Amino acid sequence: MKFLCIPLMAMFITACSSPNIQDYTNTKPPLKLEEFFNGPLTAHGIVLDRSGTVTRRFSAKLIGTWQENQGKLEEWFTYDDGEKQTRVWLLEKTGENQYQGTANDVVGTATGQTNGSAFYWRYQLEIDYKGKPLQVTLDDWMFLINEKRLINKSEIIKYGFKVGEVILTIEKH
């Protein structure tokens, strides 16, 4: 019985500490992806390993376009080591505060929800790790600071464990 209690307590503590999209009800300004991600944007960020050490820095240019409930977000990343990467998101507003998206390096479909000034979505991403493809889960949170600025925090998860993190700011032009 003693051995059963320890894993259950660990799961309970972990569950209690996780944010929930409902925690952001009535926070302002409200985040509408089709409004913020419409037009030219710039991003700057860092990639951290599992111990919190910065392993990479990057900048990105983004252009978002929307027609009704369909969006496209093009992203051009430049890393501090000279690597360049392009990601094109095809987004869809599927309901009130509900979104889904696909991209060239996303496995399957990302699904997410806004509430107040926050957006949360989770998806599988294929990354290059030591020259080989590796599939990881991204637990992705975005927080609108004001009409021109958003902060994005993504946990990189493999086998249920956090193995890294990406933190970036995105600014609207």
Image (cartoon, helix red, strand yellow):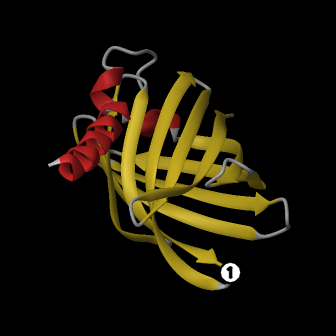
Q: Where is residue 97 in the image (x, y as percent from the top left)?
A: 28, 35
Q: Name the residue under label 1.
A: 130
Q: Where is residue 21 in the image (x, y as percent from the top left)?
A: 32, 32
Which residue shows up at 30% across the image and 19% down it? 25
Q: Residue at x 77, y 60 (%)?
A: 78
At which x and y percent is residue 34? 42, 39
Residue 104, can we see it? no
Say left or right for 142 vs 17. Answer: right
Give the class, few, some or many, for how many residues have Cα within 10 Å of label 1's Cα (few <14, many ≥20).
few
Q: Residue at x 33, y 14 (%)?
A: 26
Residue at image point 64% right, 51% down: 62
Q: Spot the residue most to the left.
A: 1
Q: Can residue 42 be seen in this view?
A: yes
Q: What residue occupies the far right of the structure in this picture?
A: 81
Query: Which element type, helix, strand or loop, lies under badge 1?
Result: loop
* Quadrant the C terminus occupies: top right
Q: Residue pushed farthest front?
A: 2
Q: Can you give x and y, in whole percent of width and height, for residue 134 in the image?
A: 52, 77
